[in-house]
Amino acid sequence: MEFRRINGLPPYVFATINDLKLEARRAGEDVIDLGFGNPDIPSPDVAVEKLAESVHNARNHRYSASRGIPKLRRAITDLYMRKFGVELDPDTEVVTTIGAKEGLSHLMWVLLAPGDGALVPSPSYPIHIYAPLFAGAEVRQVRLERPSAGTGATGADGAGVSQSVLGSGEAFFGALVEAWESSWPKPRVVVLSFPHNPTTSCVDLAFMETLVGFAKEHEIVLVHDFAYADLGFGGYKPPSILEVPGAKDVAVELYTLTKSFSMAGWRVGFLVGNAEIVQALTKLKSYLDYGTFQPIQIAAIVAMNEASEYPLEVNKIYQDRRDALCDGMNRIGWDVVPPEGTMFVWAPIPEPYAEMGSLEFAKFLVKEAEVATSPGVGFGPGGDGHIRFALIENEKRIGQAVRNMKRALPKLG
Ligand SMILES: Cc1ncc(COP(=O)(O)O)c(C=O)c1O
């Protein structure tokens, strides 16, 4: 049988590492899992309790509203006002999605038709590349690199944040403009996501302003996946693109409870911003789904309203883990720059092992150090010189991972 839409999909390289991890665990090895970005921190208690309570009410067993019940849309507009000083109309500028991933995927169906163009960073979270491709668009990738050590990197105290932040943004914007100018037909959509997975690049509001200005001038839609909205370290606060005055003319943003509230399995996200685009996605979704299970929507409201400080606790945990991993790696001679945001460390493959490439190196780490990571090539060819560590094990386990890697990598500085 032929499946033309998916025939061209490359094998999912993360699955290779995951299989190796499972095999090693079955053989009794204690593999430390820093692979998938699947949060281990529990969801807020109030959300869990509210879910348990509301599931007993038969009224909540019926189909719900595909765009999200009104109080849920109101809870996200309150959150945007509180956190970013951004005013949103819950009736026209918000639609609930089944996580950011589903939201982004269906949004691309709305924005792009076969033959249209989209610009996407390289490397990238895979769905940023594949959602436009599934919609039939031509995808052009734009190099995104995080400045390396010594170019304004932050220490754990946050010193140097703005220099490093601007370093990522300026180079990327230059590459973006060049890609746009040399593309035909002109790309209609730019997919962005800062703090960025996997490179951990961060930007400031001035960068967002520049982008919005560019998008207005050229009638481009900016789609900002803000999955790491609440994960900024050492005093760095990731900006929402909607903080830019007038951004709603050209931009939409995806916000999700997955990382901020550690509610990955619940599948609650939102598309907010430009009303026309939000309404277009709302319409498409009304054909596709009947909404998230209502008790989950109710529990999500409670999380945002009553556990509004939870993202700070989550942030602190990731920051401590970041420090444990980065300090440990630097101590054993593997130079890494601590990220200012996300829940990842994007590490260049150390020189003596560089020729292995990221997939072989990640396999080697599972086998020889009992540490699972994500090979950079899984985020596109632009990622092949790196591997990504997800900070989803506690500090003690991270310390163990560092000791294992020191043993397995004798050629380190
Ligand atoms: C950039 C980015 N967007 C979206 C997601 C997934 O978000 P959600 O669980 O809301 O679908 C992730 C998860 O790793 C991510 O890294």
Image (spheres, rainbow, N blue to C red):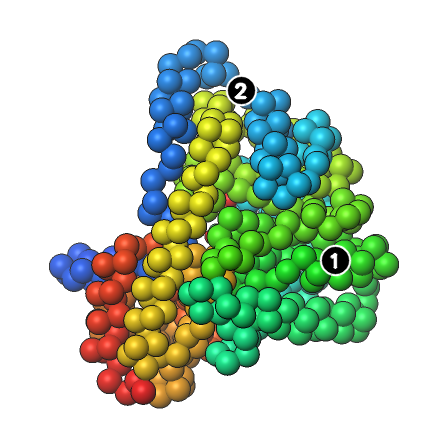
- In the drawing, does residue 325 fall left or right of residue 197? left
Q: Position of residue 244 (x, y in %)?
A: 73, 50
**Distance Cα–Cα, label 1 vs label 2:** 40 Å
4 and 284: which is toward the camera: 284
Q: Could you tell me which residue is drawn at 30 percent across and 71 percent down?
A: 328
Residue at mark 1: 209
Q: Could you tell me which residue is drawn at 68 percent across and 51 percent down?
A: 241
Q: Which mark is residue 12?
A: none
Residue 156 position (above or below residue 274)? below
Among the two numbered marks 1 and 2 on one chain, the one whose residue lies closer to the N terminus: 2
- Estimate how packed mark 2 is, as few (under 14), some (14 to 19) or many (20 or more) residues with alpha carbons within 10 Å: few
Residue at mark 2: 63
Residue 242 position (above or below residue 402)? above
- In the drawing, does residue 180 fall left or right of residue 84? right
Quadrant position of residue 86: top right
Quadrant position of residue 410: bottom left
- Estimate how packed mark 1 is, as few (under 14), some (14 to 19) or many (20 or more) residues with alpha carbons within 10 Å: some
Element at badge 2?
loop
Which amino acid type is marked by label 2?
Tyr
Q: Could you tell me which residue is drawn at 28 percent across and 54 percent down?
A: 394
Q: Residue furthest top?
A: 58
Element at badge 1?
helix
